[in-house]
Amino acid sequence: MSKIILHIDLNQFFVRCEEIKNPNLIGKPVIIGHDGRGGIVSTCSYEARKFGIKSGMPTFMAIKLNPKVIMIPGDYKFYSSMSRKFINFIKTKATNIEQASIDECYVDMTKELKDVKNVEQYLLDMQNELYEKTGLKCSIGVAPTKFLAKMGSDMKKPMGLTIIRRKDIRKMIYPLPISDFYGIGKKTTPKLEKIGIKTIGDLAIRVNNDDKVIKNELGKFFFAVKDMINGQSSDYVDSEPFDPKSIGNSHTLPFDTNSYNDLKENLVILAEEVSQRAKEANKVGTTVQVVLKDNGFKVINRSISFSKPTNDFDVIKSYTIQLLDKNYDSEKMIRLVGVTLQNLINPSEVTIQMSIFDDFEKIKEECATKLLISELNRKMNKSVFKTAAELESEKRNGSK
């Protein structure tokens, strides 16, 4: 029996968050990004897209296309907060959830929808309930595999619902342009077009015939593509491990960038997500790792360790920024960033050790005094002797 996999994608998430804070932005051409040299459009409203503005475009170009565009630098702390509301809402509907990024997730609802007579109406109601409770709009793709569900959620925006069955692949997926194939990047697309692959259907025919030219072009990815096209790819939704030794999030950027500000903003988002997930898992860690993958797929892993285990966002953010500062190279175009909190333990396992900066002699003296007072009170069978600190505390609290 096929699984029922959902891909839920929040529509123009960053912009929608700004609209929730300021309803006057609704219907306006809004972009999230920074002005000046190196400024890049992170995302933009549907109204801005009508002028040809798109993610990854330099902000100066967006302003040329529409001088009246409203530019907002972004409130990433608020975006993370809204993302948590989104995931917490989905958790009220299902238990098997895989958060793919700050604004999307996969959900295995096979069990939850087993006895639902009208699945389409149920999901539309869920979509509307999310909007009513959080103000967030989403598109939903429903399919037997994660790939097809992702393709489905991209088909209708905003507030779309697309159901794809295996028997629908030829009709719904094949006519799409090859650029719409999720997983085939911007570099591979023109190469495929050059050898006559204009649509996903064109690719399907040649892949299913084990075309040697396509095999050579796609390499190891060839067999994954073949499974995807035929509805045989993964349907496994990977929920949070029961007892993780590390908690990390990574994000493939919507565009390659060498902008320090863009990298920092995305890493701060990930740091907050990691902090929140660690708190939800009741874990603290002693190492922060940052991952930067450039457009040549070279990966830079850097980490920093500290003595006091934590899951505090400000601490994780501080170390994340330190690692970025030490490893930022304006010559490298980055396509993926990641943050991980490692060496996780339960807070109850933390051994509180005396810092080398503590006044050991003073502490030793205080302990000896308390032990003497405790022994005298024990012999007299009542609390006669007290420290000055205890007397001061009782005075503040009105005790006698």
Image (spheres, rainbow, N blue to C red):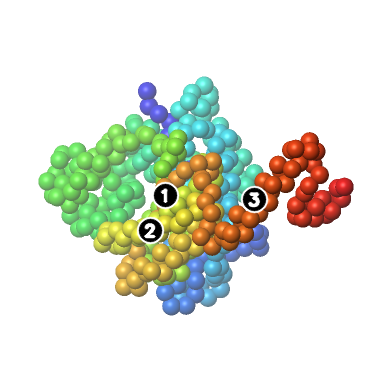
Name the residue located 41 percent from the left edge and 69 percent from the top edge.
Answer: 325
Q: Identify which amino acid the numbered label 3 is placed on.
A: Ala
Q: Is residue 291 visible?
A: yes
The residue tagged 1 is 342
The residue tagged 2 is 303
Q: Is residue 12 above or below residue 32?
A: above
Gap between marks 2 and 3, in whole Å? 42 Å
Q: Residues within 10 Å of mark 2 (few under 14, many from 20)?
A: some
Circle 1 SS class: strand
**Callout 2–callout 1 Cβ contact below 8 Å:** yes
Q: Residues within 10 Å of mark 1 (few under 14, many from 20)?
A: many
The residue tagged 3 is 368
228 relative position to 376: left or right: left
Circle 3 SS class: helix
**Relative depth, front residue between 339 and 193:** 339
Looking at the image, tell me whether mark 3 or mark 1 is earlier in sequence order. 1
